[in-house]
Amino acid sequence: MSSANWLFVIVLIAASVPLAQTILAQDEGVFEPYPDKADMLIVVAHPDDESTFGGLIPYYAVCQKKQVIFVCLTSGEWGHGMPHHTLATDPPDYSYDDSDYPRFEAVPVDALYPCFYRELELTRALMTMGVNTKPIMPRFKDMSGLQPWGSPEPALELWGGREKTVEFVRSQIDRFKPEVVVTMAANGFNGNPIHAAASRAAVLASQASGGDTPNSWLPRKVYLQVAEGEVYETVHSHSWDLNCNGNLGQARILAARGNVQHESQEMKEVCESSTKFTLIQSSVGPDVVNKDNLFEHLD
């Protein structure tokens, strides 16, 4: 979107919530109903965190034609120094209903809820990358300056405790029954506690699912992104320059085009050539043949 168009969107949002509904409705029209079963479920903390996965989303959604469900736990209202709609002392908001996403009644008329913009940016990024369903965004609270850096505990506490957070992610796993779950690096990729909490919740939810709870689901494979400096027994780099419907590097191109949709974060139209992952849970054995395929043994 050009700078002029982006300014036009902000003016409309600030002027009237119903007009904002009209703007986003244009994007919502391309989304399909949620499926009963997904191939891959991705869990992140903020809009734009998907950029740390390189070409993962378009490679599987477009090139491999997998059903990808995207879960973003916060709306990133602390991103880029924007104003905030809540105070640090306010309780987290755990209400969730995807039937009216985004919940426009929660957006004040003066548009001081900046994550509304970031939600819009995320929907456009995901559409660009081939995801055909709306991102699931429960609006867990985002906050800057949590300590200690690199630990998930401050954010899990902010969100009402580990059990509540894990239960939400688990509910999505049970709902969509993904074969593969992918989440952020254990240290949050860059040490951000909000990132680390999203990762920890996804891992614990994947382990909890499939237990004694009726109708619970156990993902067959769970992958962690590997950040610089993290050491695992087995790490592989997934190339995004692979063949995509006859076009080499198409996934990388689509990811770059998706990244630049995050204009409020000044994201550039770039994508890394490869991204590192480690398989931390598997009911089908280790990856041994094709380390560019997170669905090895499943296809």
Image (cartoon, rainbow, N blue to C red):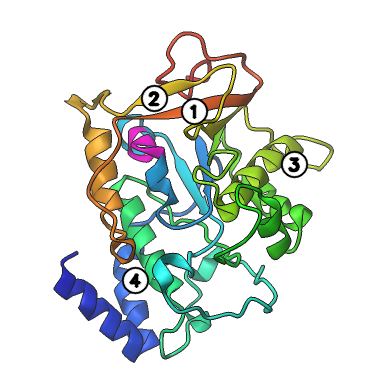
> Mark 4 = which residue?
24
> Mark 1 = which residue?
277
Q: Residue at x 71, y 53 (%)?
A: 153
Q: Residue at x 41, y 43 (%)?
A: 52
Left or right, 259 with reference to 66: left
> Mark 2 = which residue?
238
Circle 3: is it few (<14), some (14-19), or many (20+) Cα within 10 Å?
A: few
Circle 4: is it few (<14), some (14-19), or many (20+) Cα within 10 Å?
A: some
- Looking at the rendered structure, the kind of residue marked 3 is Asn
Q: Answer with mark 3 or mark 2, whichever residue precedes in sequence.
A: 3
- x then y, percent, for residue 259: 30, 51
Q: Is residue 89 above or below residue 99?
A: below
Whether residue 57 appears in magenta in the rendering, the answer is: yes
Q: Answer with mark 2 or mark 4, whichever residue precedes in sequence.
A: 4
Identify the element where label 4 is drawn.
helix
Whether residue 156 appears in magenta in the rendering, the answer is: no
Q: Is residue 191 above or below residue 286?
A: below
Mark identifier at residue 215 = 3
Mark identifier at residue 191 = none
Circle 1: is it few (<14), some (14-19), or many (20+) Cα within 10 Å?
A: many
- Looking at the rendered structure, the kind of residue marked 2 is His
- Majority SS type along the magenta span: helix
Q: CA distance from mark 3 to mark 2?
A: 33 Å
